[in-house]
Image (cartoon, grey):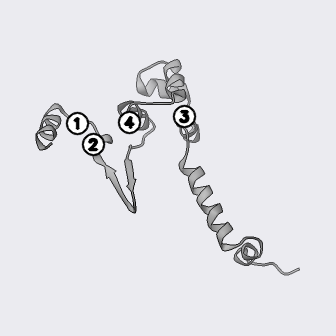
């Protein structure tokens, strides 16, 4: 029995519209991940996170289940995972990165920013 390339099989089973919809759904599912899932994917335990954040394991558990977090709390959690936080905003067809949420500001930088406003 001859084999068929995936591209040919894909065309026989799904329309272009169905393939595009499936791709969008997969991308959205990959993009939407909870903190706990991210930590587990990196093979880091709550105890290890607690040590990195200098809090208790119970505090990490509570943090991961909160429906709403402060940006500074999220930033510290991401840093403890070895990552870097970046906030992107989409307005119409434009996407911009908000720089002031990903890094700490010194008191001098905050005063300087306030003068610009």
Q: Callout 2: few (<14), some (14-19), or many (20+) C-alpha neighbours within 10 Å? A: few
Return the disc, 1 or 2, that comes first in the chain's sequence. 2
Query: How far apart are labels 1 and 4 at the CA level?
Result: 13 Å
Between 117 and 9, the one lying in front of the other is 117
The residue most toward the right is 1
| Residue at which label 1 appears | 105
Between 14 and 78, the one lying in front of the other is 14
Between 88 and 35, the one lying in front of the other is 88
Depicted 82 relative to depicted 11: above or below: above
* Contact (Cβ within 8 Å) of mark 1 with mark 2: yes
Report the residue at 51% width, 30% height from top.
67
Q: Secondary structure at mark 1?
A: loop
Report the residue at 57% width, 53% height from top.
28
The residue most toward the front is 92
Query: Disc 2 vs disc 4: which is toward the camera?
Result: 2
Q: Secondary structure at mark 2?
A: helix
Return the disc, 1 or 3, that comes first in the chain's sequence. 3
Return the disc, 2 or 4, that comes first in the chain's sequence. 4
Query: How far apart are labels 3 and 4 at the CA level?
Result: 17 Å
Residue 44, which numbered label? 3
The answer to whether residue 22 is left or right of residue 89 is right
Find residue 30 and report its horizontal and vertical position in percent.
Answer: 57, 51
Q: In which quadrant of the rendered image does the N terminus lie?
A: bottom right
Q: Callout 1: few (<14), some (14-19), or many (20+) C-alpha neighbours within 10 Å? A: few
| Residue at which label 4 appears | 75
């Amino acid at each position: 029995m001859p084999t068929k390339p995936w591209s040919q099989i894909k065309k026989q089973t799904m329309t272009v519209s169905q393939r595009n919809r499936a791709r969008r759904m997969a991308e959205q599912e990959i993009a939407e991940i909870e903190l706990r899932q991210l930590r587990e994917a990196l093979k880091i335990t709550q105890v290890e996170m607690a040590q990195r954040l200098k809090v208790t394991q119970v505090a990490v558990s509570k943090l991961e289940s909160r429906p709403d977090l402060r940006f500074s709390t999220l930033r510290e959690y991401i840093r403890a995972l070895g990552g870097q936080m970046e906030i992107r905003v989409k307005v119409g067809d434009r996407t911009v990165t908000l720089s002031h949420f990903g890094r700490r500001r010194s008191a001098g930088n905050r005063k300087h920013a306030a003068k610009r406003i």
